[in-house]
Amino acid sequence: MNSALELGSFINFFEVEPIRTHEAGWFYGAHFEAKIGADTVLVTVAPDEAEFFIEWRQGERVLLKLKLVMVTEWIFQTRNGREQLFLKTATDREGICVITLRPEVAVNLELQW
């Protein structure tokens, strides 16, 4: 968990305010719904619980549903017009997930042996 995380970083990245937050505070759960062109991205972030959930839709079609646990790093990056969120996990296999919203939505997941 990165204690330097701020709600504003997620608001800037998703370009929307959370639609709902946990009663104990956003760090325990904040839900976002971002519309990017024909895509809808539903996200729940819970840094205190080290959890991240994303559902990516085009219209009524669900393209991806992914839940990550034991997220140890949350890194926001903008480079060459790409807005990205890097999520590093530490389970039995280390993983990295890269969420890209601009210029188009993309999700990449890589697990180490």
Image (cartoon, rainbow, N blue to C red):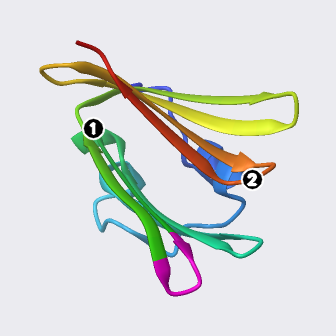
> Is 12 situated left or right of 6 in this image?
right
Tell me the residue at 81%/49% (across/down).
Answer: 103
Q: Is residue 29 left or right of residue 32?
A: left
Would residue 46 be found to the left or right of residue 12 on screen? left
In this view, 101 is above or below 23: above
Count of numbered tags: 2
Earlier-in-chain disc, 2 versus 1: 1
Asked if residue 60 is positioned above or below residue 110 in the image, the reply reads: below
Whether the residues at callouts 2 and 1 have beta carbons within 8 Å, the answer is no
Mark 2 or 1: in front is 2
Q: Secondary structure at mark 1?
A: loop
Q: Give the quarter of the figure containing the C terminus.
A: top left
Mark 2 residue type: Glu
Viewer-proximal residue among 82 and 109: 109
Structural crowding at the residue carrying mark 1, measured as other residues with C-alpha within 10 Å and reported as few (<14), some (14–19) or many (≥20): many
Tell me which segment is drawn in magenta: 57-61
How far from the left and from the top, in percent, is residue 105? 66, 54
Q: Which residue is mark 1?
A: 50
Q: CA distance from mark 2 to mark 1?
A: 26 Å
Q: Residue furthest right?
A: 80
User: Magenta stretch: residue 84 in it?
Assistant: no
Q: Nearer the viewer, residue 22 or 65?
A: 65
Q: Residue 6's x, y, as percent?
A: 55, 40
Image location (x, y in percent) of residue 95: 33, 24
Q: Which residue is mark 2?
A: 104
Mark 2, other Cα within 10 Å: few <14 / some 14–19 / many ≥20: few
